[in-house]
Amino acid sequence: MSDAPAIEIDVLVEAPAWEGVPDAESLVTRAVIAAVEGAATEYELDIEGAEIAVMLTDDAGIRALNRDWRGKDKATNVLSFPTPEVARGGGDPHLGDIAIAFETLEREAAGENKSIADHLQHLSVHGTLHLLGYDHEVPEEAEEMEAMERTVLLTLGVSDPYAETEPVSQAS
């Protein structure tokens, strides 16, 4: 993780529940850097001086964001808001924002027998990859995104989050 571009990561802890995860900010920062480095290495991205903001919120906060920005009035685990290409082309170093909801993350981690720390790193990687242009709307893109997630998470010492699932191309 030494040759990747330097980026600035701002982590805002908005919900008190995150106080129960004392290393949450460092886990997020480490995961975001690893995702940027993985994608930069794979695609030779030039994101020197880039900025990413991450908000650690709760289900109510992420539900409001999901409702206001995506028209979906429900909580979710992670949301990514990439900076529009036109702004990036104009020299805006801000790649975008990520929001992660504590209760949903905690529920999913428990349901999948994962630690909160591992799931937090996974969602941080996932959100960052969305900011870098990855998506999972079609099977081919989902396979590419999952492969990058696996690669990045391996560098972080996090188990493959997709090991127990069917390959994307076979999912219904």
Image: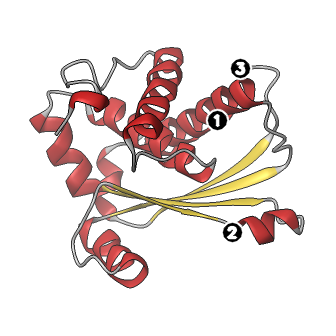
* Rendered location of residue 56, percent (x, y): 42, 58
Q: Nearer the viewer, mark 3 or mark 2?
A: 2
Q: Which residue is mark 1?
A: 33
Disc 3 crowd rating (10 Å Cα; few below 14, some 14-19, many 20+) is few
Sooner in the amino-acid sequence: mark 1 or mark 3 = 3
The residue lying furthest to the left in this view is: 111
Disc 3 target residue: 1
Q: Amino acid at mark 2?
A: Pro
Tell me the amino acid under the disc marked 1: Ile
* Circle 2: element type: loop
Residue 47 x %, y % = 81, 44
Label 1 secondary element: helix
Please give the residue where the numbered disc 2 appears in the rendered image.
84
The residue at the far bottom in this view is 68
Q: Quadrant of residue 15?
A: bottom left
81 left or right, relative to 168: right
Q: Kindly identify the residue that appears in the image at 61 percent across and 49 percent down.
A: 133
Measured in 3D between alpha carbons, the distance from the residue under mark 3 to the one under mark 2, in whole angstroms, is 27 Å
Looking at marks 3 and 2 on the same chain, the residue that comes earlier in the sequence is marked by 3
Which quadrant of the rendered structure holds the N terminus?
Answer: top right
Rendered location of residue 35, percent (x, y): 59, 34
Q: Which residue is most to the right? A: 91
User: In the picture provided, is 115 more to the left or to the right than 62?
Assistant: left
Q: CA distance from mark 2 to mark 1?
A: 21 Å
Q: Is residue 133 left or right of residue 142?
A: right
Q: Are marks 1 and 3 in contact (CB under 8 Å)?
A: yes
The reply to whether dot 3 and dot 2 touch (C-beta < 8 Å) is no
- Numbered label attached to residue 79: none
Q: Secondary structure at mark 3?
A: loop
